[in-house]
Image (spheres, rainbow, N blue to C red):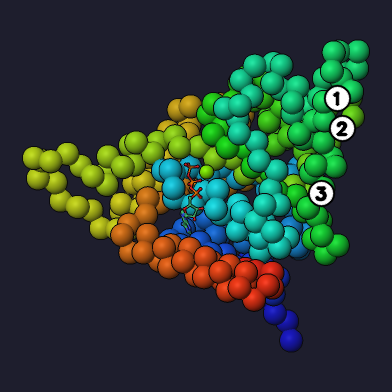
């Protein structure tokens, strides 16, 4: 029997990731769908060679789950939410701070003592026998200095980074996540319009579309086209409402409960679905 290709159909491994993410992440369906899609493409060997497995930009208000989404994906695939190499872009504003990321060139003071934060060993350290993927998170990229920005563009485009001592780091097995709060102020203004103006509240789908376009417009204003063109997906995380916050509270309480029980029993605490 000839079966036609269905791009919406996912394999068992991608389905498992989808289920695990739904157990951990509340109210961010688009983000989950995009991460699962890229993982499915990777499993099928369809991602572009010589580029990272996926380049994601996560936008949206603080506390909407951007970082949690990356951790939850690492937890589902590699068994540990901490299996993420995190770079806080605000900490690398000056050229000597960039040396912390890539190491200083031979001959410079401290060359031997500095261990670059972005070496191949650091990148590969969390890979498992089954899953040879690395997770790299660049937080608050709007604060990145020009020097860091140039490094980032090279990684996103060619999946390589040249260290201070000329060694090359290969990012072709990495999922790159970048986060930013750009446009978050405008998004909350949309949700809480000023008092005194009789405005009709738009339907939830229309509001979601407005929030999406507000985030995208803010990113396009701030970032260059060459950066935006290197992204596979830009996801705008929705501001969370009361009902979603309650579900998150339940999730967090369940985690604490499991931890307390496992401590009492002296057994290691395992996350759901891993
Ligand atoms: N959508 C969500 N699903 C599940 N948990 C969430 C979600 N959003 C937030 N949380 C909870 O709130 C905490 C803070 O969220 P997170 O660090 O992901 O926010 P963020 O969007 O990265 O914010 P910031 O822009 O300030 O970095 C998480 O550790 C998690 O416990
Ligand atoms: Mg964050």
Secondary structure beneath dot 1 equals loop
Q: Earlier in the sequence, mark 3 or mark 2?
A: 3
Report crowding for label 2: few under 14, some 14 to 19, many 20 or more residues within 10 A (C-alpha): few
For the C terminus, the image quarter is bottom right
Q: Quadrant of residue 20?
A: bottom right
Foreground mark, 1 or 3, reads 1
Residue 90: name its quadrant.
Answer: top right
Residue occupying the point 48% across, 32% down: 220
Residue of label 3: 125
Numbered disc in front, either 3 or 2: 3
Q: Nearer the viewer, mark 1 or mark 2?
A: 1
Q: Nearer the viewer, residue 207 or 82?
A: 82
Residue 14 in the image: above or below residue 200: below
Q: Which residue is mark 1?
A: 113
Disc 2 is placed on an element classified as: strand
189 over 165 or under it: above or below:
below
Residue positioned 62% across, 37% down in the render:
138
Which residue is found at the position 68% from the left and 30% from the top? Answer: 153
**Dot label at residue 168:** 2
C-alpha gap between disc 1 and disc 2: 19 Å
Residue 192 in picture, x, y percent from top left: 23, 44
Alpha carbons under labels 3 and 2: distance apart: 16 Å
Drawn side of residue 74 relative to residue 119, left or right: left
């Amino acid at each position: 029997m000839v079966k036609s290709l269905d791009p919406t159909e996912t394999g068992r491994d991608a389905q498992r990731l989808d289920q695990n993410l739904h157990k951990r992440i509340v109210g961010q369906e688009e983000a989950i769908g995009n991460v699962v899609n890229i993982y499915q493409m990777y499993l099928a060997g369809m991602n572009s060679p010589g580029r990272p497995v996926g380049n994601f930009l996560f936008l949206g208000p603080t506390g909407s789950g951007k970082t949690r989404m990356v951790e939850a994906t690492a937890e589902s695939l590699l068994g540990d939410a901490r299996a993420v190499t995190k770079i806080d872009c605000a900490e690398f504003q000056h050229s000597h701070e960039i040396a912390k990321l890539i190491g200083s060139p031979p001959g410079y003071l401290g060359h031997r003592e500095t261990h670059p934060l972005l070496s191949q060993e650091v990148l590969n350290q969390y890979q498992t026998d089954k899953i040879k993927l690395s997770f790299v998170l660049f937080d608050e990229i709007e604060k990145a200095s020009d020097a860091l920005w140039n490094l980032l563009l090279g990684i996103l485009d060619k999946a390589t980074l040249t260290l201070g001592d000329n060694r090359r780091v290969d990012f072709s097995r990495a999922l790159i996540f970048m986060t930013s709060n750009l446009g978050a102020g405008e998004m909350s203004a949309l949700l809480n319009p000023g008092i005194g103006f009789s405005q009709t509240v738009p339907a939830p789908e229309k509001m979601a579309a407005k929030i999406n376009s507000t985030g995208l417009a803010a990113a396009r204003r701030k970032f260059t086209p060459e950066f935006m063109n290197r992204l596979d997906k830009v996801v705008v995380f929705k501001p969370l409402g009361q009902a979603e916050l309650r579900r998150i509270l339940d999730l967090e309480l369940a985690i604490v409960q499991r931890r307390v029980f496992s401590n009492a029993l002296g057994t290691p605490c395992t996350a759901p679905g891993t």
